[in-house]
Amino acid sequence: MASANLRRVADGGGAGGTFQPYLDSLRQELQQTDPTLLSVVVAVLAVLLTLVFWKLIRSRRSSQRAVLLVGLCDSGKTLLFVRLLTGLYRDTQTSITDSSAVYRVNNNRGNSLTLIDLPGHESLRLQFLERFKSSARAIVFVVDSAAFQREVKDVAEFLYQVLIDSMGLKNTPSFLIACNKQDIAMAKSAKLIQQQLEKELNTLRVTRSAAPSTLDSSSTAPAQLGKKGKEFEFSQLALKVEFLECSAKGGRGDAGSADIQDLEKWLAKIA
């Protein structure tokens, strides 16, 4: 029985034999075609395939509409979230779950994003980051500029993990470090915060790379921040990290308007 089937295929039986005459005809036509025309056809097909591939990538990117607000507790994430959505001041408290809402950006395209405020508590923040990071179009890392000097090590440790996770994503998100609470007299500037974070991240990078590895030979090595053998700078990263200053509370107390115009412009740019 098996030998009979093999003979049938060899003689042109089955699906292959059915289409063989058409394949032979197509091959003969291609051989007789003007080489110049054939080159044009191949070029057109290449362009079409490129356009299809580009559209697939763009549609995947456009499906990522989430902007994650992350940071330590009391950095002002939730008030920023409320201000962006309503423009109003509201007393907030430390949350143990995420909050999300659609945000209409201020641009001519009428785009919208989904703002997601993630808990900043140490025992929860990495868990929620893991849950939402794959849908992130952008990440806004909020820093308390007034408390930065005493929190710099904690800020750097969390930022280190967020950066490592972001660089490991298939579609790298836009990344902003929002230096909040600029209305407070002792607030550090965005430039100073950037410089101190670079120093702390450089120290973290050295200590973590020197720590004994628990990875087995089949595991993937963790991503490296910056360029090996050089002092760390944000400009060395594969993703662009931007800094800006803002104040969710505003300079005139609870009844005043927030100073978040630069943040709103950044969101409109990445939408």
Image: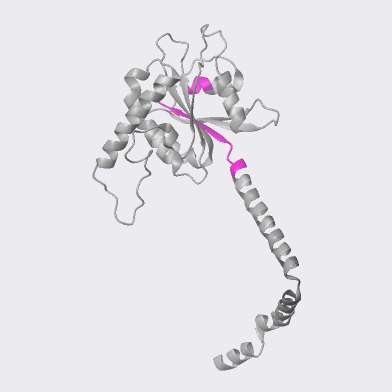
**Furthest-left residue in this view:** 212
Residue 70 magenta-drawn? yes
Instruction: Give the quarter of the figure containing the N terminus.
Output: bottom right
Q: Position of residue 241 (x, y in %)?
A: 47, 32
Total marks placed = 0
Q: Position of residue 267 (x, y in %)?
A: 58, 28
Q: Position of residue 197 (x, y in %)?
A: 37, 27
**Residue 108 can be seen in this image:** yes
**Furthest-top residue in this view:** 252
In the foreground, 12 or 253? 12
Q: Is residue 244 left or right of residue 126?
A: right
Q: Residue at x 58, y 40 (%)?
A: 64
Q: Is residue 16 above or below residue 227?
A: below
Q: Is residue 213 left or right of residue 132?
A: left
Instruction: Give the quarter of the figure containing the C terminus.
Output: top right
Q: Position of residue 15 (x, y in %)?
A: 67, 80
Q: Is residue 228 above or below residue 68?
A: below
Q: Residue at x 67, y 52 (%)?
A: 51
Query: In this picture, which residue range is highlighted in magenta?
Result: 61-80
Q: Residue at x 42, y 18 (%)?
A: 145
Q: Residue at x 48, y 39 (%)?
A: 133
Residue 69 magenta-drawn? yes
Q: Is residue 157 left or right of residue 141?
A: left
